[in-house]
Amino acid sequence: MQTTADYDVIIIGAGLAGLTLSRQLLLETDKRILLIDRRDEIPGRKHKVGESLVQVGGYYFGKVLDLEEHLFCDHFMKYNLRFYWTSANRENRSFEDFSQAYIRPFSNIPCYQLDRNKIEGELLRLNQMDEKFEFTKSISNLDVQLDEDGLHSVAFEWGGEPVSATTSWVVDTSGRRKILAREMDLEEENSVNHGAAFFWVDGLVDIEKMTDRSLKERRLNTDRKSTGHLPLWLATNHFMGEGFWFWVIPLQGKTSLGLVYDRKLISHNDVATPEKLTDWICERFPLFERDLRKRKVIDHSSFKSFSYGCKQTINKGRWALSGEAGRFADPLYSPGSDFIAFHNTLIVDAIQSESVAELESKCNFYELMVRSIYESLLPTYAISYDALGDQEAFSIKYTWELAVYFSFFVFPFINDLCTDRRFVLSFFKHFSVLGPINKNLQQFISGFYQWKKTNGHVISEPIFHDFTQVGPLQTAADTFYKVGLSVEEARTVLADQVEGLTELAKYFVAYMCSVLMNDKSILRNRRFIQGIDLEHLVFDLDALQQRYLACVDGIQDYEWSFNSDALEVFRTTPVGQTENMPAS
């Protein structure tokens, strides 16, 4: 590298966000790129979390970055997200003791379990094959001087010598070092107060083998009528409890394991080391006694607190942040690579602006978009994390959130609509309708969970539930096949999805009320259902009981557009509670 040079884009940080941004720029533009990193070895030897991809990230890595061959050869194709709960009448020492919730078919958009070091090594290799790309590691004393009207200046030391460069764009992908955010006072707190502890072990942790049953008995297990025959270890498997979840993610030759938890309920000191975490998990999920203690720990780490916001992540002054250098909410549902995909795509488009006015317009829209997406997820993590402890409450929560994700995250992304201003305006119009509904529904779900906990509603025996049995979720997933649409056609799809999601939210409220009042007829009570006000919804048991009593003799002719019995597998009546009478 020269001691003085000019570039179109300088990217700070050669992690997943920086390497993917470099590749996307090389594939889609003619820009000259310098990627810099302080580390001596790229990728490093230490393992990294953020291994699980969902649909936006899977599409981005496979299709946009053209990595499908590498992903299928060197990583596992992922079998969706699966969730497990203990059963009150079982010892929970064997896999068959656990309740399960899942989606049975593979996703039409492939998702993957990433070995972070492998994927980052491949991205660096591919980038270095392009003459427009330069990479410098082992830098120190980095100094970035931003000039809104001219070229930015970047200076650092390399091999004991000073190096300086000018560039049109600076993008910070330095991860939790947050170089630009800290220098420019952009850091923000948010309402999520969670921690994490995680480690990697040698070999495959196969949860289906945690049993006393023989191989033949496992093959012929009648539970397979519900679960099917695909290897469940291919999923990102979540073991759930109130305010926490424990992941089991397969990587080739090793397994990633980790706990994410609400700090109000769990102390970091109780789970901060692999030994403590193993003890903690084995106590709550005894089946892991069969496996984890005999495993060799390869690596480990933890975060006392990991969630934060950022005042701005893309600016008309030709600077941007991507990945964890900007915002990070929570790893539940594996959204990290999704945010990288969204940010990188918007940054690449902004870099290609042909005028100052176009750049300013794009940056205003794009910042609003990524902030809206980030803020839309905060209620999921900050309000109803307690509901992770109950299969029924969580199934309502996840089905709702997944339907929104498929419609408003995946569908626009796979149609390259996120950078089309005509579509973005329509997106905001429809998305804003869902904002208050989502926040209120999250609060209602949390209230429902706490009521169930107080009134002794527990899972006694294993329950198996496919989320797509609730029709609107499958309708949302069908948008994966709506590709190559015009803006007008895409607007129609969004409008239809908003209508379906609004019906879904009302259905969930009506169903939860039918459980609260122990009266299934509420699901057909026209007066009660039409009186549900999603924009002013609160969990007030006395008010709900009064509404119920006022409507109890209402006409039973309300027709949903889907099967309203989809959640009946969860309906239970605790001992001592009589029919048609709400518990205290």
Image (cartoon, helix red, strand yellow):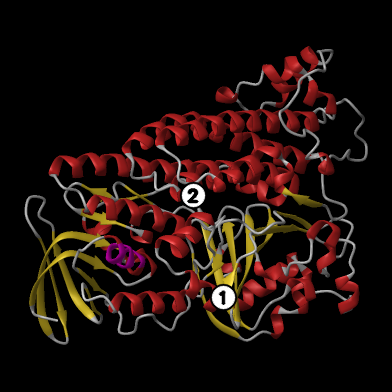
Residue at horizontal 63 percent and vertical 40 percent from the top: 475
Is residue 81 inside the magenta stretch? no
Task: Estimate the x, y position of residue 552 in percent, counting from the top left.
Answer: 82, 16
Q: CA distance from mark 2 to mark 1?
A: 23 Å
For the question of whether residue 456 can be seen, the reply is: no
Q: Is residue 548 left or right of residue 581?
A: left
The residue stretch that appears in magenta: 20-27
Query: Do labels 2 and 1 touch, CB within 8 Å?
Result: no
- Where is 581 relative to 277, above or below? above
- Where is 472 relative to 256, above or below? above
- Name the dominant secondary structure of the magenta segment: helix
> What amino acid is at disc 2?
Val
Q: Which mark is residue 199?
A: 1
Residue at horizontal 25 percent and vertical 80 percent from the top: 137
Is residue 21 inside the magenta stretch? yes
Q: Nearer the viewer, residue 170 or 537?
A: 170
For the question of whether residue 560 can be seen, the reply is: yes
